[in-house]
Each structure stands twice: as structure tokens, then as C-alpha cells.
Image: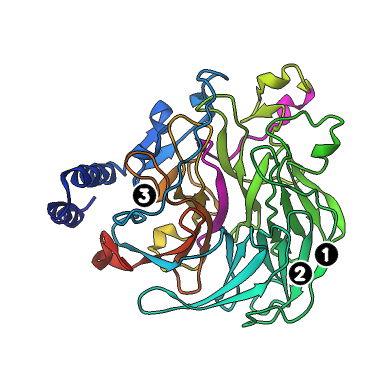
């Protein structure tokens, strides 16, 4: 942490209450320690140990035995954003509230012309946000399409500057709308591309319902992620789990090709690595094995690869609820590239291709962590950064990038869901806790500890 950053924190502290000052100085201390990656048991942290710039690295060797701690139901207590609460990020970056008053904003993607397409899943709408005012707000907001069925994934096809279609992942189908750059509402009727994806419901007994969509770099393949129906039900002869906990491959016109990867409990967000062309995913793992099992993860997907669910996790570790099942698969389980904190609920991910962030961020992954419920120490509720090198995870570590969505006493006012880089070089973050979109831009030294729109 720079000397100028410390001065900013100190001068701000003078104007705050003693309790707020203590919290601010604790954050400053964590920033000062950001160069040290937390490893081993120190990497298992709750929200109170999060701060922008703090890095963690979890490995298979760090994982406890199943049931080392009792499984808990510690769902968040949602509150309205307190007047003094605002997302926190690193010095040199600025956080603005780009839009608010939304209705369950979920996945967000950037169209080639720079418009931001947002899925409002509960109201079954896709919205379009355009431009930025001088105070960081959206210049225009439009409803592109309505009457969908729990829409989530959004993709533009064909790839390149002039797509002809917007694809949308409903919970039970992939549909598309004719599109030309600049369209703020669908120019034609919806067309069903894939009518047979297993449908979702809601969590807490209803199954994973989100469906993301991505196209290969050559445009020949369409990938659709489908989460499991259950936490850890055996899939043998289980029709309810057919073609679930997978990423499915289709042609762009909807012809089923194959199960691309399997044993992936819930790849909520998928994205194609611009450097390698590999498909990557941000994955929710299983619950009820204890506080520190099983880690969520971000990883590249290998064609035909098996990632363990429901019988194994994190390589050859067998889930005790399926003891003795499928020993022939034990050696086939692929260990993920980046292990995240257990129960973080890692959702959408994106690659930094053209941001105006410092050059060391380019090519890195940014992902939204929606937040835990099955953990005594609340964790997640942040945006993280995964350092990359030549298109691969640099060392398996990840870093807190945007935090501050949980109050000092553990109440939750914000829950990140979606992340995308706009053509203006800023990172846009959807938050279905405060029903907002946040805009994170790099402004250099003049932006240290700066907040606007307050």
C-alpha cells in the first residue's frame, strides 16, 4: 500500500465515528498486507477478513475431512443499503452506481456496439442499458424483450462486430431474437433454438435454474450450462438428473451434439478464454459437508472431462454420502484450476479483454461471488480477480477486488451476480441485493478511495 493511500485513509478517518474509523483502519491494514497471499488454513476466511487486494490460494491439501464442522443454515439477513455503505475497491479505482431500482438484475453481457444487455430473471425481461452520463449513470434504459421464462444467459451470434442474433438461455430452452447493432427492442419474434433443456425451478429444493450460453471462437459450437436438480443425489438411473450437472454442446441452430463436460454441479457462468479458445466456468459445488467443504471453483473445461459430482469432489475425494460408488471414476476426476472459498456461490465470470485497467489486469478473470448460506462464517458477497498468465491460471490464487456488501455486524445489503467489461473500459457489476448495477473504472492516483453518486 502506498504512502499516499495511507494518508487518504487517515484523513478520511478523522471525519468518521470511532467505530467506523476502526473498520476503515482495519481495511487499510489488510490493503497493506495485500502482497502476501493467504495460504493453508489462513485462506479460509469470512467476510470480516475480506478487503480489496487480499489474495488467497487454496489447495487440495488444505481441505478438511467431511463433517469436520457441523453443516449450518446461515442464510443472509437482507437489509437496505445503509447510508454510509458503498462497495470498496483498490486505490486508483472508482465505484459508481450506474443504475438502481431494478428488479432482480442477474447476468449482464456487452453487445459489440457497447450496449449492456441485462437479464431480469424474475420479471422475465431482457433490458438494454446505453451510455454513461457525467455522474456515472445510464443514459438510456430499454426493455429489449419480455415474456421469457427465467432468462439468464445472453450471447451474440455470429461473433464479431455485426451479430445477427441475440441468444437467451431460458431455464428450459434456448431462444433467440433477430438483432442488428443498436437495436433496443427485438426486431422480430422469438425463435426457439433448443426446446428440450431440463427446466429448473428455484433453489432451496427447486433445483438450479440458471442456463448460460456461449459460442466457440470459430462459431461452430454452442455451449449451454445446466446445473443439477439436487445437492448430491445419485444420478444412476435418476431421470430427474438427466442432462444436468453438465455443459451441453449444440450447433448454433440447436442440434444436440454431446455432453461436453459432466460432473459439474452448477456452472452458473461460462465464458470462452480469448487467448486459448478454451471454455471456462464458474462453478457452485455441493453443500452440507461442513463449513470448509466443498470449495466452489473456476476452471477451464476439457472436452469430455469429468469433474466429480456427485460421487467425488476436488479430484479423488469421495463424497461419504456415496461411499464405494463408482471406483472406476476415481482416477478420472479433474481437479479445478482455482479453488475458491467453500459456499461462496460463484456466479458470472468474464475475461478482461479491453478494459482501461492497468496492464497487469489484462487477460485476468473477474467473477461475482453471490455469497454463502451453508457456512458459519459468512463469505462471498464480493467480486474477485483471478490472475492469468498466457491464458492460464497463473498460480491458482485469487484476489478480493470489490467488497463491502456486508455490514460490520454481518447483515447483507448487496449480492454480486453478473460482471462484464463495457466498451468504455469499465467493469459493470450487477447486484440483486440492492437491485443495482455498479460501475468500476480506473482513474489513477486521483481516484484513491474515491466514491461518487453518494
Tell me if residue 118 is in the magenta stretch: no
Tell me the tag on residue 176: 2
- Can you identify the residue that label 1 sits on? 193
Residue at horizontal 70 percent and vertical 44 percent from the top = 227
Q: Secondary structure at mark 1?
A: strand
Q: Which residues are magenta?
A: 328-352
- Disc nearest the viewer among 1 and 3: 3
Q: Secondary structure at mark 2?
A: strand
Corner quadrant of residue 182 = bottom right
Query: What is the count of numbered marks?
Result: 3
Does any portion of residue 389 appear in the rendered image? no
Compare residues 189 and 4 and report the one nearer the observer: 189
Tell me if residue 344 is in the magenta stretch: yes
In this view, 43 is above or below 152 = above
Percent of width and height locating residue 334: 66, 35
- Can you identify the residue that label 3 sits on? 404
**Mark 1 and mark 3 residues within 8 Å of each other at the beta carbon:** no
Amino acid at each position: 500500500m502506498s504512502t499516499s493511500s495511507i494518508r487518504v485513509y487517515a484523513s478520511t478517518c478523522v471525519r468518521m465515528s470511532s467505530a467506523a474509523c476502526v473498520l476503515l483502519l482495519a481495511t487499510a491494514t489488510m490493503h497493506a498486507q495485500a502482497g502476501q497471499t493467504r495460504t493453508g488454513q489462513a485462506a479460509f476466511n469470512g467476510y470480516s477478513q475480506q478487503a480489496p487486494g487480499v489474495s488467497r490460494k487454496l489447495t487440495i491439501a488444505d481441505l478438511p475431512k467431511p463433517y469436520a464442522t457441523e453443516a449450518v443454515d446461515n442464510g443472509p439477513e437482507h437489509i437496505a443499503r445503509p447510508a454510509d455503505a458503498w462497495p470498496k475497491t483498490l486505490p486508483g479505482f472508482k465505484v459508481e452506481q450506474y443504475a438502481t431500482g431494478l428488479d432482480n438484475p442477474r447476468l449482464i453481457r456487452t453487445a459489440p456496439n457497447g450496449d449492456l444487455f441485462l437479464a431480469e430473471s424474475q420479471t422475465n425481461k431482457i433490458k438494454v442499458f446505453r451510455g454513461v452520463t457525467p455522474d456515472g449513470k445510464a443514459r438510456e434504459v430499454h426493455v429489449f424483450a419480455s415474456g421469457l421464462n427465467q432468462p439468464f444467459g445472453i450471447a451474440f451470434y455470429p461473433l464479431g462486430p455485426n451479430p445477427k442474433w441475440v441468444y437467451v438461455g431460458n431455464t428450459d430452452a434456448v431462444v433467440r431474437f433477430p438483432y442488428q447493432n443498436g437495436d433496443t427492442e427485438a426486431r422480430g419474434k422469438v425463435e426457439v433454438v433448443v426446446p428440450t433443456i431440463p427446466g429448473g425451478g428455484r433453489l432451496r429444493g427447486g433445483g438450479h435454474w440458471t442456463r448460460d450460453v456461449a459460442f466457440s471462437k470459430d462459431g461452430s459450437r454452442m455451449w449451454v450450462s445446466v446445473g443439477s436438480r439436487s445437492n448430491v443425489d445419485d444420478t444412476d438411473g435418476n431421470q430427474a438428473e438427466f442432462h444436468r450437472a453438465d455443459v451441453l454442446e449444440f450447433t448454433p441452430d440447436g442440434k444436440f451434439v454431446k455432453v461436453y463436460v459432466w460432473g459439474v454441479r452448477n456452472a452458473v457462468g461460462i465464458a470462452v478464454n480469448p487467448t486459448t479458445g478454451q471454455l471456462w466456468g464458474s462453478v457452485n459445488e455441493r453443500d452440507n459437508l461442513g463449513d470448509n467443504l466443498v470449495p466452489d471453483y473456476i476452471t477451464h473445461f476439457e472436452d469430455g472431462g469429468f469433474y466429480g459430482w456427485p460421487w467425488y469432489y476436488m479430484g479423488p475425494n469421495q463424497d461419504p454420502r456415496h461411499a464405494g460408488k463408482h471406483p472406476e471414476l476415481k482416477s478420472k476426476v479433474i481437479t479445478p484450476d482455482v479453488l475458491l472459498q467453500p459456499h461462496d456461490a460463484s456466479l458470472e465470470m468474464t475475461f478482461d479483454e479491453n478494459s482501461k485497467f492497468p496492464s497487469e489486469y489484462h487477460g485476468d478473470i473477474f467473477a461475482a461471488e453471490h455469497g454463502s448460506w451453508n457456512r458459519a462464517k459468512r463469505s462471498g458477497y464480493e467480486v474477485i480477480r483471478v490472475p492469468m498468465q498466457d491464458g492460464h491460471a497463473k498460480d491458482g490464487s485469487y484476489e478480493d477486488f470489490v467488497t463491502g456488501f456486508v455490514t460490520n455486524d454481518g447483515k447483507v445489503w448487496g449480492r454480486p451476480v453478473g460482471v462484464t467489461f463495457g466498451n468504455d473500459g469499465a467493469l459493470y457489476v450487477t447486484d440483486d441485493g440492492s437491485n443495482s448495477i455498479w460501475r468500476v473504472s480506473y482513474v489513477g492516483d486521483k481516484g484513491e478511495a474515491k466514491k461518487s453518486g453518494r
